[in-house]
Amino acid sequence: MISDIVGRLRAAGCVFAEDEAGVLIEAGRHGDLDALVARRIAGEPLEQVVGYADFCGVRVRLRPGVFVPRVRSELLVRIASDEAAEAEAARVVDLCCGSGALGLAVRHRVPGITLAAADIDPAAVACARDNLGADVVHQGDLYDALPSHLRHRIDVLIANVPYVATKHIPYLPAEARDHEPRTALDGGDDGLRIFRAVAGPARGWLAPTGLLVSEITEAQIGRACAIADENGLTATIASDDDLDAYAIIARPDPAR
Ligand SMILES: C[S@@+](CC[C@H](N)C(=O)[O-])C[C@H]1O[C@@H](n2cnc3c(N)ncnc32)[C@H](O)[C@@H]1O
């Protein structure tokens, strides 16, 4: 059976066909294995097919149509966790939370945090509620979704916003283009439209010593730092070559 599945996955272009066959067989133990294999062969991301992703040491539940957490986002988790560990019962917000993977991973590393998460997409909110709990996850447009008592009190604001420039969307892998919602990917003309909308009001939500951390591309570093500066934030850049990841870390500038 396994060699048949491996062969069909390989023919469909799956690079890690043996590994994927093992994951599908395990997931199909209590269900319809043929249906799972068929969905994968049709191009759906493996994580959406089996209903989970292993990310930063936690198992994240996933639903069809919800953004699959990327390995490179471990950089955001590391930065957020290090910062959260510095404060007692740090208030951490996972804005644009998707499945809630980043907040879940930070809470796993620093269990004492108070976590809130939010997303605009009802499917993502439902998925994040599976992972984080119903009372933690809010639905709405960026800060509109957050409880007002968090104003000026957020210690760590994680915002893995959509940051693909619109003109680059056609070059994404079909798995992303066809199975992840456009709202999870498209960052507008320069990819920084949502980051601008997050950075703009950030000072009004961050604690004086809080930070905002967002994933960006190498090409976006200059513009992202300028956006932070225009909004009274002091920015630094973190990167990880192995993860091929860049993050902007922005803090309220006490001089402004
Ligand atoms: C790149 S995905 C990141 C998801 C998750 N944080 C992760 O890393 O796996 C971006 C998420 O932002 C959400 N989003 C896009 N525009 C938004 C907005 N205006 N307000 C709230 N969430 C938004 C999308 O629905 C999507 O879930």
Image (cartoon, rainbow, N blue to C red):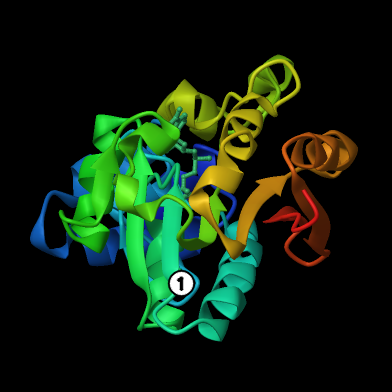
Q: Measuring from the top left, give residue 158's x and y in whole percent.
A: 53, 55
Q: Residue at x 37, y 66 (%)?
A: 104
For residue 122, which quarter of the picture? top left
- Mark 1: give few (<14), some (14-19) or many (20+) Cα within 10 Å: many
Q: Measuring from the top left, give residue 120's x and y in whole percent.
A: 35, 31
Residue 44 visible to an observer of this rendering: no
> Between 60 and 81, which is closer to the camera in this rendering?
81
> Between 43 and 93, which is closer to the camera in this rendering?
93
Outermost residue to the front: 255
Q: Measuring from the top left, give residue 23's x and y in whole percent.
A: 35, 63
> Between 98 and 205, which is closer to the camera in this rendering?
205
Q: Quadrant of the N terminus?
A: bottom left
> Between 175 and 81, which is closer to the camera in this rendering?
81
Q: Residue at x 20, y 41 (%)?
A: 35
Look at label 1 and name its amino acid. Answer: Val
Residue 45, relative to residue 194: is it above or below?
below
